Amino acid sequence: MELEKNIIKMRMLIYFDWRKPMSKDKVILGFETSCDETAIAIMRGEELLVNTISSQVDIHEKFGGVVPEVASRAHAEMIRNIFHSSLNSANLQISDIDSVATTDGPGLVGSLVVGYNFAKSIAWSIDKPLYTVDHMVGHLAAPLIENPNMEPPFLTLLVSGGHTQIVLVEKWGDYKLMGTTIDDAAGEAFDKLSRFCGFGFPGGPAIQRIAESGNPSKINLPRPKTKHEYNYSFSGLKTAATNFLKNIDPDDKITRADFAASYQEAIVDSLMINFTKAVKETGVKNISGGGGVMANSRLREKMNILANDNNLEIFLPSPRLSTDNAAMICVAAQNDLITNDLKENDVRLSSIIK
């Protein structure tokens, strides 16, 4: 055990000695493979040259969700071609790259390994520094791509398939987790009910499309509360929705659009109730958001209403930059929001794969 700790310490020393400070006007190549999107981006300073996202939705749709082994295999098959096509689109040679950044977790381990190892091999081959970025810090930094002047303090709502978090950013690198989910994430709540109803995969976009012609007030679904005022719980809402469907009266004129709209409204309301309370308690004047669920049009509408009603500055990434992408990894690395405080028991890939 002591030998293993010493090896990890040696690896960490090598890692830190090798990495150099990044200049913002240089070309950075970014990779994001934490789940089922093979994403590569290239930025020169604040200019986004390429933002390639290859989705595996068609592959996983027949399973009703992401299959980890299938996802990692698809990443391995696609990443090389996407890399070369991204360089071509940016009209660059590999020698033009000044630094490389990649997601180091959290995510599906097999998928992360593919992107991490490919990024590391590129950095090694051109003798350039490799920067590792936490996936959720990437989402937190995503608004910087289109709003490079965004500065703390601000409160952000990070909502995805695996996470639902309210984070207070008092300064870059200083994050206070004010609330999180105690069971399902908001994205999971969309996906699981969509699979149950046969609406399609991924669940969030499928439910949003169906909800467009529905009445969000048609069905009274709960807005679950937890003992901690800022924490979330979505498993009870999911159960209430499935029980409603199982016990529905055939004479009730409930359309699938009404049901989808009511369910979406319950999730969005739940997210906004806690986030609004956190905004008022902290007294922040700037708010932001990120993660795949932040691409939801109803959630974006309510975030903007909150900002307008309270004279807040709001920074939301565009829908394409809200979902998983590598541009957010680039901009996080450019702003030194990197995984640079490794511990001996850290399970991130950057601390165990050298």
Image (cartoon, rainbow, N blue to C red):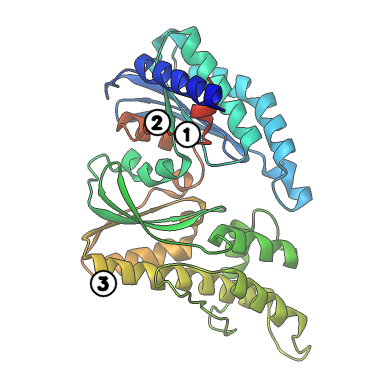
Q: Which residue is mark 2?
A: 330
Circle 1: element type: loop
- Residue placed most toward the observer, 74 or 200: 74
- Verify CB contact (< 8 Å) between mark 1 and mark 3: no
| Residue 62 pos. (x, y %) | 78, 49
How far apart marks 1 and 3 lie (CA) works out to 33 Å
Along the polypeptide, which appears first: circle 1 or circle 3?
A: 3
Viewer-closest of 133 and 258: 133
Q: Which mark is residue 326?
A: 1
Residue closest to the eye, 100 or 312? 100
Report crowding for label 3: few under 14, some 14 to 19, many 20 or more residues within 10 A (C-alpha): few
Query: What percent of the width, then of the height, locates residue 7?
Result: 51, 20
Mark 2 burial class by Cα count in 10 Å: few <14, some 14-19, many 20+: many
Q: Residues within 10 Å of mark 1 (few under 14, many from 20)?
A: many
Question: Which residue shows up at 71% across the image and 80% down it?
Answer: 243
Q: Nearer the viewer, mark 3 or mark 2?
A: 2
| Nearer the observer, 326 or 347 | 347
Q: Amino acid at mark 3?
A: Asp
Q: Is residue 268 left or right of residue 312?
A: right
Q: Callout 3: helix, strand or loop?
A: helix
SS at circle 2:
helix
Depth check, mark 1 against mark 3: the one in front is 1
Give the Cα distance between marks 2 and 1: 6 Å
On-image quarter of the N terminus: top right
Q: Quadrant of residue 312?
A: bottom left
Give the residue at x 42% y 40%.
Answer: 138
Residue 211 drawn at (x, y percent): 59, 69
Determine contact: label 2, label 1, CB under 8 Å.
yes
Residue 350 image position (x, y, % from top left):
49, 28
Specify the amino acid type for callout 2. Answer: Cys
Q: Mark 2 and mark 3 in contact (Cβ < 8 Å)?
A: no
Q: Residue at x 50, y 46 (%)?
A: 323
